Image (tube, helix red, strand yellow):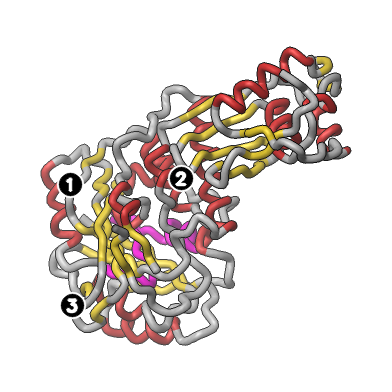
Amino acid sequence: MKLSVIMPVYNREGFVGSALRSLLRQQDEADLDIIVIDDGSSDGSVAVVRELERQTPCIRLFQQANGGVTRARNAGLKQLLPQTELVSFLDSDDISPAGRFREDLACFDADPDLELTYSRMMLVDRIDEDALAPAADSNSITVRGIHLSAGIFRRGLVERIGAFDEDFLQAEDTDYLLRVFESRPRYVMPDTVSLYYRRHPGNMTKEADVPFREFMRAVHKSIKRRKSNPSLARIEGIFDLKDLAGWRFM
Amino acid sequence: MRQSDVYAIASKDIVFESFDGEAVVLDLATGKYFGFTDTGSCLWEALSSGVSPEDLVGAATRSGQVSAADLDAFVARLLEFGLLAPAAGQAAQPLSQSLVAQLANAAEPAQVDIHDDLADLILVDPIHEVEEPQGWPAVKQAS
């Protein structure tokens, strides 16, 4: 089954190589198609991607003027191959764990009607760039969070959900996932660690006004959708972030 | 209820945003979401910024004037939900012209409703990108 992984890139020359290598090491376990959308980077990101693209045909790089991550994700969706059966996402500063695809693809093999696997993610403060895994002295925590990389989506589901909502500057991923789960997909929640998420300072605070406003908007839109269409599913029992509550990232 | 009272947002866990004139309030301590009708949104915005209920009675909406009884009931709900608290001794703020205009366009009854099915998300902030990394943080488990 062809699996297209969409990766938007904007000025991540220090990270995008590791992100791509973390996918490429899984080539034997998944029929990968890596769609990189460079969103007008002004650093050396494109050169890093081009170098890897030369080494493998499964990377396809597309460049566009800077338009933000939401449009970049949509540009990626437009580049799915005719034979793409499954879709996933990886951000250009994150790492796809070894074996991540093998584990979840088995679920699709076992259930032809399955539309989505939604797995766990590990937040980690230090990555070993050679092993592409958490460094020995890293701190980490694993949760079923809100992240596109946690999902592998059947193409039919992606087509049913449609594009990312370009009204969102951020939290487009939250909005998208809420729309996905509201639509009552056939899904499973494996315990696979689908992602090593590099923990940057400031990205989980309640004081970061713009992201939080965007998050509130995603919540607001979800509730409005469900009010006007009672057939949509309530979002319960999917995201489990409780363990994060006991942690402080300093 | 003494309508001369002035109210304020009850705690720092109560956060408020407005989207296209619709007020959205989250209680970060409980994960509850509070949604408002159009009239409710205007009244919340006014009351939470220190406008006295007294100054809202009689305000014109598309479905008539805001009555003292409706306002009392609305304020009582906001107090009951822990969204507002009396702000004793604070001076009442004037009702802005933009809110007067917004109220004049509002047609629904003043109501607030609660949703708690997204509490898992609201209780712990979701994970979003930041502009630029500022160096690697230490991670410590809180005791």
Q: Residue furthest front?
A: B89
Residue assigned mark 3: A136
Quadrant containing the C terminus of chain A is bottom left
Residue placed most toward the observer, A203 or A230: A203
**What amino acid type should be assigned to the residue bearing mark 1?**
Phe
Label 1 to label 2, Cα distance in Å?
A: 21 Å
Q: In the figure, residue B92 lies in which quadrant? A: top right
N-terminal of the two: label 3 or label 2?
3
- State the SS at label 2: loop
Chain of the residue under label 3 = A
**Mark positioned earlier in the residue sequence (1 or 3):** 1
Residue B112 location, x and y as percent?
60, 25
Front: mark 1 or 3: 3
Image quarter hosting the N terminus of chain A: bottom left
Left or right of residue B70, residue A164 in this image: left
Label 2 lies in what chain?
A
Residue B10 can be seen, yes or no: yes
The amino acid pointed to by label 2 is Gly
Q: Which residue is mark 1?
A: A108
> In which quadrant of the rendered view does residue A94 lie?
bottom left
Q: Residue at x 46, y 86 (%)?
A: A44
- Looking at the rendering, the stretch of residues picked out in magenta corresponds to A72-95
Residues at marks 3 and 2, CA–CA distance in whole angstroms: 41 Å
Asked if labels 1 and 2 share a chain, the reply is yes
* Residue ID for mark 2: A162
Residue at 27% across, 53% down: A143
In the image, which is nearer the foreground, mark 3 or mark 2?
A: 3
Q: Are marks 3 and 2 in contact (CB under 8 Å)?
A: no
Element type at mark 1: helix
In magenta segment, residue A90: yes
Mark 1 or mark 2: name the one nearer the start of the chain: 1
